[in-house]
Amino acid sequence: MPQYIAFLRGINVGGHRVKMDRLRSLFDELGFSDVSTFIASGNVIFADASDDVGALREAIEGHLAESLGYEVAVFLRSPAQLAAMLGSNPPEDDSGASTAPSHYVIFLHAAASESLRSTVAALTSETDAFLFSGTEIHWRIQGKLSESPLFGGAIERALRGTPTTTRNMNTIRRIAAKTASHEAGG
């Protein structure tokens, strides 16, 4: 049965507190199997026989809005998509270490339009660099997120209301490892 990872926007930030057992039960209510959460930032791993990602996303978004009382943007990826994302990761130095201390991935529902690409790329600086890869934007920061001049709203303004959610690459690596061990039967 296909496995999916749901990256949810706005869980346990901005006053929207949801306990992970509650979040798992909301996914159980939709009939999904093997539901688990990964850290308390809105990462849900589940399995479902459907391969209609659009319909799954709509069902999850609708159920969460009805159950929680506010809209939650949902970004679905398969374990294979996470593995591909890690495989096409922006360059690392010869030692295998990241060339930037901080690496975030901004998830989109569809590939960024030329207008969005241009707007975000214009934010490139000595501190911040962006790489567009399919339905993700890799954001590399020389330093901590809080040290970026884009921290605190500038990136959100640049995204101009485009539905997104952002995760640290370390979180994505850990989720990919968890789903890989699940697929291997571990």
Image (tube, rainbow, N blue to C red):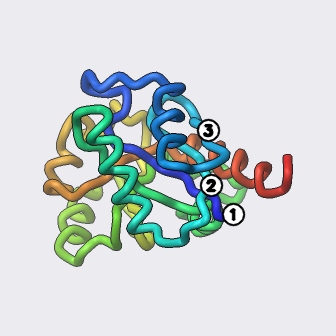
- Say which residue label 3 marks: 36
Residue depicted at x 53% and y 25%: 21
Residue depicted at x 57% and y 36%: 37
Mark 2 belongs to which amino acid? Ala
Question: Nearer the N terminus, badge 2 or badge 1?
Answer: 1
On the image, the x and y values in percent for residue 69 come to: 23, 33
- Mark 3 and mark 1: span between their CA atoms? 15 Å
Name the quadrant of the N terminus: bottom right
Question: Nearer the N terminus, badge 3 or badge 2?
Answer: 3
On the image, the x and y values in percent for residue 59 come to: 37, 56
Please indicate whether residue 150 sits to the left or right of residue 32 in the image. Answer: left
**Mark nearer the viewer, 3 or 1:** 1
- Say which residue label 2 marks: 47
On the image, the x and y values in percent for residue 113 come to: 24, 75
Tell me: residue 156, above or below residue 137: above
- Say which residue label 1 marks: 1
Mark 1 belongs to which amino acid? Met
Residue depicted at x 30% and y 50%: 62
Mark 3 belongs to which amino acid? Ser
Q: Residue furthest bottom?
A: 114
